[in-house]
Image (cartoon, grey):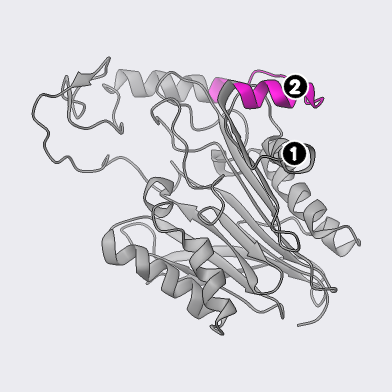
Amino acid sequence: MRGGIGVGIPLNAVALQSGASVLDAVETGCARCEADQCNGSVGFGGSPDESGETTLDAMIMNGDTMEAGAVADLRRIKNAIGVARAVMEHTDHTLLVGESASVFAENMGFIAEDLTTNKSVNILSEWLKGNCQPNYRKNVLPDPSASCGPYKPRATARRNKRAQGANERSHDTIGMVALDRDGHMAAGTSTNGLTHKVPGRVGDSPIVGAGAFVDSSAGGAAATGDGDIMMRLLPSYLAVELMRAGADPSAACKTAISRIKRHYSGFFGAIICANTTGHYGAACNKVPGFSQFHFMVSNSESESPLMEYVDCL
């Protein structure tokens, strides 16, 4: 497939089609989703943590130079993907976190704003009324399956099931992979993380190789889902290396999902993949309530982005 292609969850590829760089296209697409609060899982006002605060994670990667920039647990700044790019372009670092990331952003000219909305306040209020269910604590007292905190360690550890109330809307990500007509590639992610997460939690989205990975000589991939599990097996890195070895994007995506499923059969997750020729694919793990994964594709052969889907494994 010739020309520019963008694959995303979802994707705004207007910038790429107008001749902007792949990095600009990824940043523009993610920033649009941040501003629009896509699905409530990206941008301000969504996925409050246990204390009711919304914090943001984002990452952007240059497939030509292998440079990357990321932020995690970002407070007060709505444009997380923009701050991630500033980390890449204005520091020698890859990842900045927490309050120090917010201070960096303000020094770079980003506007400090309250990320709380009436919606996020209501989400917290209802959660507290429901005895803080679901939550992501284990081996603590009082019993986290029936009570709110504060919690203290349980003297004898025991196995706890993952929070049963978690679903695909409680942890999601915008992930993008872009390829232009000259073979330049970039990838990026942005999310507000897991609803009711323990304050300070960072998922897979800002982690290179987990949330996304791209190499202009092989391809790119971006993932979404249960980041606490997915980041342990680096699915985006694995998918790109499989494409480097000759696997087509669909096969690479399926293998990356299957690798995680081998260890965590009930995890929620999906991944998109695109290679250097513009071919693309996706895969997801089938769990109750999630049997298909929809994603957007835009290229020079279509006048507008097209929604496609795959059946989950």
Quadrant in which the C terminus appears: bottom left
Residue type, mark 2 in image: Glu
51 left or right, relative to 90: left
The residue at 51%/24% (across/down) is: 120
Name of the residue lying farthest toward the front: 92
The residue at 26%/19% (across/down) is: 148
Would you name the residue on which mark 2 appears?
106
Q: Which mark is residue 21?
A: none
86 left or right, relative to 191: right
Q: Choose the circle earlier in sequence order: 2 or 1.
A: 1
Give the answer, above or below, for where 89 lies relative to 268.
above
Quadrant in which the N terminus appears: bottom right
The residue at 27%/14% (across/down) is: 150
User: In which image quadrant can residue 114 be found?
Assistant: top right
User: In which image quadrant can residue 206 be found?
Assistant: top right
Give the answer, above or below, for where 143 lies relative to 96.
above
Q: Secondary structure at mark 2?
A: helix
119 left or right, relative to 183: left
Name of the residue lying farthest toward the top: 150
Task: State the image coordinates of residue 86 (x, y, percent, origin top left).
Answer: 76, 38
Q: Is residue 116 visible?
A: no
Would you name the residue on which mark 1 appears?
82
Disc 2 crowd, CA 10 A, few/some/many (<14, 14-19, 20+) = some
User: In which image quadrant can residue 289 be found?
Assistant: bottom left
Task: State the image coordinates of residue 60 (x, y, percent, origin top left).
Answer: 68, 49
Residue type, mark 1 in image: Gly
Q: Is residue 118 magenta?
A: yes
Q: Is residue 275 magenta?
A: no
Disc 1 crowd, CA 10 A, few/some/many (<14, 14-19, 20+) = many
Separation (CA) of disc 2 from disc 1: 12 Å
The stretch in magenta equals 100-119
